[in-house]
Amino acid sequence: MSIEKKTYWKGIEQLKNDLNFVKNSQNEFPEFLPISGSSDNSRRDFLKMMGFGIAAASLAACDAPVKKAIPYVNKPVDIDPSIPNYYASSYTLGSDYSSIVVKTREGRPIKIDGNNYSKVSGGGTTPRVESSVLTLYDKQRLKGPMLNNKEANWSEIDNFVSENLQNSKKTYIISNSISSPSTRGVINDFLNKYNGKHVEYDSLSYDGMLNANQEHFDLRKLPSYDFSKAKTIVSFGYDFLGASFNSSLFNKQFAQTRKVNADNRKMSRLYCFESNLSLTGANADHRIPIKSSHFPIYILELYNILSKKINNNSFDSSEWMSNSSVKQVKTDILISIADELIENKGASILISNSNDRHVQSLVNMINMMLDNYGNTIDINNFYNIRNGSDSEMMDFVKDVNNNKVGAVIFLNCNPIYDHYLTSQLKDSLSKIPLRVSTSDRIDETSILCNVIAPDSHFLESWNDFEPVNNSYSFSQPTIKNIFDTRQAQDSFLKWSDSKNNYFDLLKTNWREKQKTTSSSEPFQMFWDRLIRDGVGEFVSPNKKIFPKLNTQNTLNSIKEVIKSIKSIDGFEVNIYQNSSVGDGVQANNPWLHEMPDPISKVCWDNYISMNPKDAKKFDIKNDPDTMSASLVNLISENGSLEIPVIVQPGQAEGTLGLAMGYGRKLCGPVGDNVGVNAFELLEKNIKSQNLTVSGVKINSTEKKYKVAQTQTHETIMARESVIQETTLDAYQKDPYSGKYQFKVATSEGYKKPEDVTLWDGHEYPNHHWVMSIDLNACTGCGACTVACQVENNIPVVGKEEVLNRREMSWIRIDRYYSSDADVHDLEGLENAAENPDVTFQPMMCQHCNNAPCETVCPVAATTHSTEGLNQMTYNRCIGTRYCANNCPYKVRRFNWFKYHDNSQFDENISMNNDLGKMVLNPDVTVRSRGVMEKCSFCVQRLQEGKLKAKKEKRSLVDNDISVACGTACPTDAITFGDVKNINSKISNTLKIKNINKTTLKLEEERAYAVLDELRVSPNVWYLRKVRNKKNV
Amino acid sequence: MHVESKIRKPLITGGKTLSDVSNDISGRVEEKPSLSWFIALGISSVILGIGAYAVYRTLWDGIGMWGLNKTVNWAWDITNFVWWVGIGHAGTLISAILLLFRQRWRMSINRSAEAMTIFAVICAAMFPLLHMGRLWIGLVWVLPLPNTYGSLWVNFASPLLWDVFAISTYFSVSLVFWYIGLIPDFATIRDRAIKAGRKISASVYGALSFGWDGASKTWSRYETVSLVLAGLATPLVLSVHTIVSMDFATSVIPGWHTTIFPPYFVAGAIFSGFAMVLTLLIITRKVYKLEDYITIKHLELMNIVIIVTGSIVGIAYLTELFMAWYSGVEYEQYAFYNRVTGPYWWAYWSMMTCNVISPQLFWFKKIRTNIAATFIISIIVNIGMWFERFVIIVTSLHRDFLPSSWAMFYPTMYDVGMYLFSFGFFFTAYLLFSKYFPVINMAEVKSILKHTGEKIKTK
């Protein structure tokens, strides 16, 4: 039986090979369709189509929403869902450096804390360090490399760069100061190959100090300072607490000299000469507002007085005092300062922000005369951060203009924006054939480059650092590259045709390094230990550095400086770095913009600060009610700016302050065009950056501008139950001095509030959480406020809503100025003194034992825990806001709008796009619209700590728990813990003797509760501020 | 002793007969609405519509549409709430307390005063509802309902919860009291409609009158129920505003934390309520030509109540100032110093002028019997009473304990819109009431007519 080849057919049409069928057989629907799509459709067709359309649309709409959470198929060994991992690393952005610990959850970095092992940064953080984790998740970062403004792939980039590097002209690498030895090695190899030069600069230049050190020590580095050993500190404009290269350590050291208690009743004394009211000035015991341009006169006079007293060798000051503009300067105060400095010889620090090498030489000479080198100042442990050179930048600019540069690589820097010399290169930069930027975004510099080879974020990178001589630290990736970025070091290796990758090179370097150390362990152990700790200290037999002084030369040149001081008409503008935005590297980070300036409490803008007397002359007023400020035109030789004015008590007369880091044009939607660019005002064509700009004119405009402030009332109105302070003399005589004890008049005489209370108090069977805040240690830096924002998923609300007074911060730092008015003059008390004493008071939920908020909530959404916490149940809250009204501390925050997934709050990037949301802390609810929120004492951390102790079957100890603000605090002003544990740190700080229900009997003399008379019985205690004022 | 009993002046003038009363009052219900009524209704519905947009945006976007902030968490919302609740008080006072005191002059005014109460309480209740961040769950969770959340219960210590009970009780009692009074009058309209053959009207009012038959037994029950309800409503007049005042008095905020608040608030409520009754009645009597029912005598008596309560309020203001000084508490002292001289001084002095000075003009008989003057002062009093609540709420909150948090409150257009919404509702409701319901209690008024009145004599 033969098998016939069977033919299968679809229908008769195919069998017949019908002409119509053949014609349509290639169509999707070969059959006749009753709907032609032409206009002659019948009513029935219309109904059919409509029917189909509706059915299809409703079917499509029935799809369940796609949830993007994908469970692990194979769980990575080191990731347990909901268990955080911590990695030691190093923060570096721009010129800033800090040793950090990164908290990751399910592979996402979500929080950065200070690394307690690090001697360099001291375990504290700064607002910028805290914020940098959000910069990792910035949507604005480049998704991959760019070639001639088009997206490209890495091999295209490498080919292009390699081809163009082969030209005969000079190759430049421009960067901020680099403290990484391995990176330096990579760069040097690259430069050797291509006849190149590496130029480092810093947006806030230390050129003067570095050059002075070069002269005195043959070492162009900054020395280490130890403020903790200093008994007398004199600062001429140097904001070591706010804007220095290592402010978290300096805060820590300074605070160590301020924490007085029964064992130590001594304090340092800080004198601050400055024109802008800085954090350092605000913390000074004596603050003398003077013009920055007069610093040389004061410093020279101080030198002269000291020299006379110590060496009996002085010169006649009349020769240089004859300068007419110098004559009016009153230097009487220097005599008593000099006495004090001599008294504390070897235990003092004189420091100045002047960028004039002669002035800094003089400062060095004074410090040497006072034996501070080797005691409080250590040049042997010099810093490798901030050693940029303005003169080398000048050479670069010259070379560009003379067409000598064949290639330039901008390594993670933005000099077109932030350097006074290169900002003029905007047009001439195109003369260079190869312009490479490793910036992570299109910024003012990279937009002028033909290649952008984006570097990975520091949280995605391997690196080593030597911030201080012989002190090393490391960074390790805490997340795989989010975008198609490549670590800049790898790019350099690639471009110098090396086969190595940077990680291997790093390891090789450290294998070599191990040989120079005393370590005898196997390399892998050595390496693992370094990476785990994040830091390593290796003492190598360094030769000691000895100064060589050329006193006469310095004196001669300083006299020239002083002679050149002219009394120029107009204002002197002092450009400074504030502690939030800094130099503007992270200007697209909304957390930094929302953080109010520690002094003026302004956010989302920079502004001119002006002395009240000067403001009166120009008829400039701030309206604290509407936050409306006058706009003025600021006209200098280098340019003019239209900018609002904030009347600032404490600003030296005739001077203006202006913060740098604002007015970015290309950093991203959050930071673009926020404020004005202060760098534009800087004097060009000088050898060193000069942040003091003289001869500036102010033209009032009729225009008004709203400046968002989180605090508009400046004084404390003589309310002693809120702020208590005393002087050191009084404190030494009576540790209770300055205490304000409210007494209630009863029929049985005056009684303390706690003796007439109607409340029974609570029993706390297990724990009783209490916090203490040392007002004397708090410098007001604001690191805690950002740390809280990160930890607790606090939304950013933007300028408009801050103007509406709806910022969401759970912790704020109240800043009060002193007033000269009589305590009964309620109107006068509203005005701050001209040069006020400043007090900072961190304020958050006080977790009252008798909380007024708890009684008024109709639905019991805010209740008391058995551990003394005032807890907020968001799910239960219906938003009557009575609790917020009834809160005497006004720390409750209401969700006026939906801040997440709401395009009206685009600046809240951590909640409004998928990438930004990666930063959210999974342990903390993102609150919905219409509910109240407030500080929870980081209850999620308490819970974690309790569980940990429970798992290990032991009772809870201090190390198990932490609060975000306390961890971030560089000065350890915030102590938190369980007072039920009599050995805990908090029990020791407050010297708790016994607990009767909620009433703590504590013996720390300085402790007080804010608004004690209300008998709300807060669980946050403040330690009275002590000022070390000199009796005059 | 020789006592001569004077002949009392008739409360209803014009020698009205029983049928005159029925004709005058029912006629308004039966006639076609006038053009001016339509215009008025049109205007109030437009206001209601504008307000509805503000309500919509508030519900859609959040309470942030208003001008509130971290420091001032209540402002116009609770001001309006207290203001409207206060206005409501006059109706209950007139119908309940004056009934118990046998003040027969109340009979011509109690119906519209009670209607005003009902509408004012609805307006008032809007604000605490709409001011909640999450109204949709708040509506349920403020009620002590059994639930599946374990032992989750409402917080009986919270004055806001007391408010929920106070307002809902007050509203239900007032509504029942008002409606019971309406039943015989609805029956009158029903009977007239049957007679005239208006079928729809007969069935609607027939249903509304619950089959009233006018039997003696029915009348007897009616009277008893009225008395019982009056007895129930009387303590409410005092309790509701007492509880509202405790929203403030039980707090710790200087300027709120005051024991004087309950009597002071009740007096203020009656003060503003009578002023609102006057405002409405002066228009109603003019438009509906009810001068014979609501006479100058009525207006004068109400004006006297205004003098008395206004003076109580004035004394309360001064007492507050004295107590602030006498207490020696610096926060209390500053709160009042700030009220008088601070950024909201204009609100304080508006309040003082409107509430303390203007009612004193009623000591002059010429003024208190002058309709135009009464009308103007009644409006001034209500403006003043709005400011009183604004001053208490906003000036106390905006500068409390910590100067760092001191802030101002500026209303937005949505704050204004919410207020307009309540006004739109109030006037729309009042216009509908005055057209379709008998504005004067016919049955009661008939009991105080002088049958052999002037009209017959002059004929």
Image (tube, coloured by chain):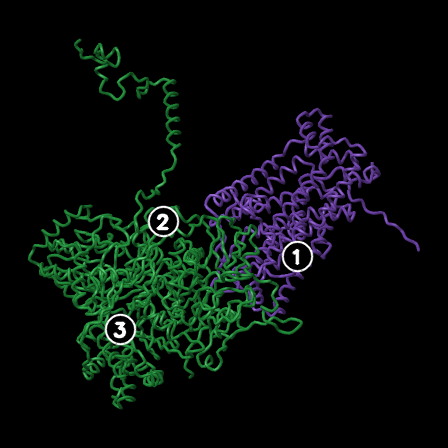
Chain colours: A green, B purple
Q: Residue furthest front?
A: A953
Residue A677, by quadrant, is bottom left
Coordinates of residue A130 in the picture (x, y in percent) = 34, 59
Q: Amino acid at mark 3?
A: Ser
* Foreground pick, A429 / A978: A978
Q: Which residue is mark 3?
A: A224
Question: How far apart are the two marked residues, 1 and 3, measured between alpha carbons?
Answer: 67 Å
Q: Which residue is mark 1?
A: B262
Question: Which secondary structure lies at badge 2?
Answer: loop
Q: Residue furthest left?
A: A168
Q: Which residue is mark 2?
A: A81
* Foreground pick, B53 / A529: A529
Coordinates of residue A26 in the picture (x, y in percent) = 22, 20
Front label number (1 vs 2): 2
Q: Amino acid at mark 2?
A: Pro
- Position of B146 relative to A443 (above/below): above
Tag 3 subunit: A
Question: How far apart are the two marked residues, 1 and 2, measured between alpha carbons?
Answer: 56 Å
